[in-house]
Image (spheres, grey):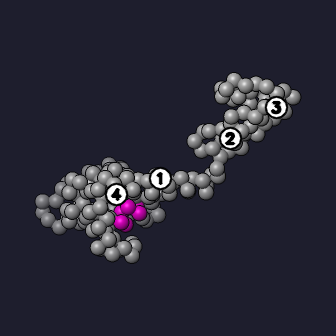
Amino acid sequence: APEASAESSDAIELPPDEERFALELEFIQCLASPAYLHYLATSGVLQDPSFLEFLKYLQYWRQPEYVRFLSYPHCLHFLDLLLGEEGGYNNTSSESAIAFRRELSSVAFRNFCHEQQFYSWQFRSRRLYGRGLNVVNTDADAKALNAEGEGKGEENEGNDDGSSTSSSGSEVETTIDSSGQHH
């Protein structure tokens, strides 16, 4: 990790490099959580100039040798919103960064950010993985699915899950969406 600047003689002693890397990785990924950002805003930390300097320092996580360790790269977007043009990585004005930090103390805004994040992940998941997996089941599997539903096992009857069964030994196609529901 890059060296932090020690401007005063009473600088905090930093942990060893591996431990520091792990701590900073964990912290920056916490920025992907609107609930954690809300906590930071309500505790007043987001108004502290030294904390904002620390956030600027964390911009090194954008470099390819570091970004590959992020499980939640969305944290970098929130970092941009927190810093605005002060961070130097986007075109957001300082006024909007201040407004964003202020609004994070609102529960309604926290919930809005969380919902938008969820919708983004849901959209990305559908684009990457489609609406579900096509799984080919044998008659025995289809009858077992049907029995779990309403217990109907009559020949060629449609199941609640959208598949059909028959006693001829043929295979039935069922779609399973990302939540595990059969269609």
N-term mark: 2 or 4: 4
Disc sitting over residue 118 in the figure: 1
Q: Which residue is mark 2?
A: 183
Residue 12 figure quarter: bottom left
Q: Nearer the viewer, mark 4 or mark 3?
A: 3
| Residue 9 position (above or below residue 175) | below
Q: Which residues are magenta?
A: 76-81
Disc sitting over residue 156 in the figure: 3
Q: Main secondary structure of the magenta part?
A: helix
* Amino acid type indicated by mark 1: Phe
Badge 1 crowding class, 10 Å Cα cut-off, few under 14, some 14 to 19, many 20 or more, is few
| Residue 9 position (above or below residue 149) | below
Q: Nearer the viewer, mark 2 or mark 3?
A: 3
Q: Is residue 54 left or right of residue 123?
A: left
The quarter of the image holding the N terminus is: bottom left
Q: Which residue is mark 4?
A: 109
Whether label 2 touches label 3, CB < 8 Å: no
N-term mark: 3 or 1: 1
Whether label 1 touches label 4, CB < 8 Å: no
N-term mark: 1 or 4: 4
The quarter of the image holding the C terminus is: top right
* Amino acid type indicated by mark 3: Asn
